Image (cartoon, rainbow, N blue to C red):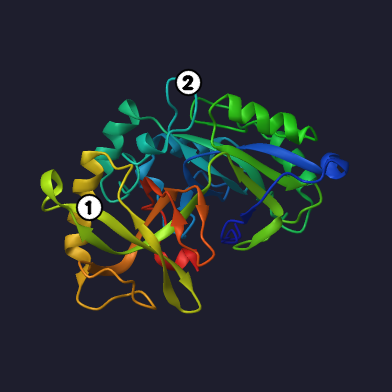
Amino acid sequence: MAALPVYSPMLATAGTLPPPDHDDEWAYETKLDGQRCLAYLPGNGTIVLRSRSGMDITAAYPELRALRTALGGVSAVLDGEIVALDEHGHSDFERLQQRMGLADHPAEAARMRHTTPAHLMLFDVPFLGGEALIGHPYAARRAALEGLPLDSAHWSTPTAIVGHGEAALAATRAAGLEGLVCKRLDSAYLPGKRSATWVKIRHVQTVDVVIGGWLPGNGRLAGLPGALLMGIPHEGGLRYVGAVGTGFSDHERERIGELLAVAAIDECPFDPEPREPAARWALPRLVGEVRYAMRTRTGILRHPSWHRLRPDLAGEDLA
């Protein structure tokens, strides 16, 4: 049996709804808040799950291994998002974080499959039945995916609708969901590329940032980071975009403090160096997601609020 091709997932560009007169040229999917995953099914009863970075995460999600026989002897590469669902059926990244990083801890993963079950939401099929579909239009790939027997307690194919983008966006907002992903019906699958033919719309503005340092806390935060110094990779360096000191739970602040203590360095990773006399510097490897109101003309984030760590990303993924 021939080996399956290995892909990096196609990525969406942040943007807005397509013009109304082109609405029927687009499909709309709910934006999920989880861990991107490509599932490799060679058709021989085995399966490999890979993260966006290509890491083998199969052992972290033992409940998804049964997917290996879902298509019988048909080979496939399936693209989707691993999520943990809350009591309303919404993807909850904070819950999923308890499962992420357990690929080297199979006993813990086996225990947590019962307390925090994972679900794989499938939305594309770049390879099927020995044929690469990456050059086929989205509409054809989606039809092929929906024709597969992929519906169980631990994986499914959520609905995509064609047209009605404004209604879909309003519905996701009313339901308290993260947002919408718009995909042109004629879009090819571009492995590893961020394309304007896939557009993501979040109901709050968020951005992934690299943590390059911190400001020590005072008072009850003594010994902990009071604020994190954020950067975005730019022209081979790390451009400073501000400090975030709100939005953390006590547990998150303590955990980040532990990670920064290990990553502490003497030299500033930002270029140019921010004017923060009390700053402590860190290896620019931790990635987090922050909410913000707007950007200043110089790129500084206004009113940032911490959202979450992104252990599934590395600094180079933001370049």
Tag of residue 226: 1
**Residue situated in front as seen by the camera: 284 or 192:** 284
Q: Left or right: where does residue 110 sit relative to residue 65? A: left
Q: Badge 2: few (under 14), some or many (20 or more) residues near its Cα, within 10 Å?
A: few
Q: Are marks 1 and 2 in contact (CB under 8 Å)?
A: no
**Residue situated in front as seen by the camera: 76 or 304:** 304
Of callouts 1 and 2, the N-terminal one? 2
* Three-letter code, disc 2: His
**Percent position (x, y) of residue 67?**
51, 37
* Three-letter code, disc 1: Gly
> In the structure shown, which secondary structural element does the residue marked by tag 2 occupy?
loop
The answer to whether residue 147 of the structure is visible from this angle is no
**Residue situated in front as seen by the camera: 120 or 262:** 262
> In the structure shown, which secondary structural element does the residue marked by tag 1 occupy?
strand
Residue 265 placement: quadrant: bottom left
Q: Quadrant of the N terminus?
A: bottom right
The residue that disc 2 covers is 88
**Percent position (x, y) of residue 305?**
39, 46
How many numbered callouts?
2
The answer to whether residue 14 of the structure is visible from this angle is yes
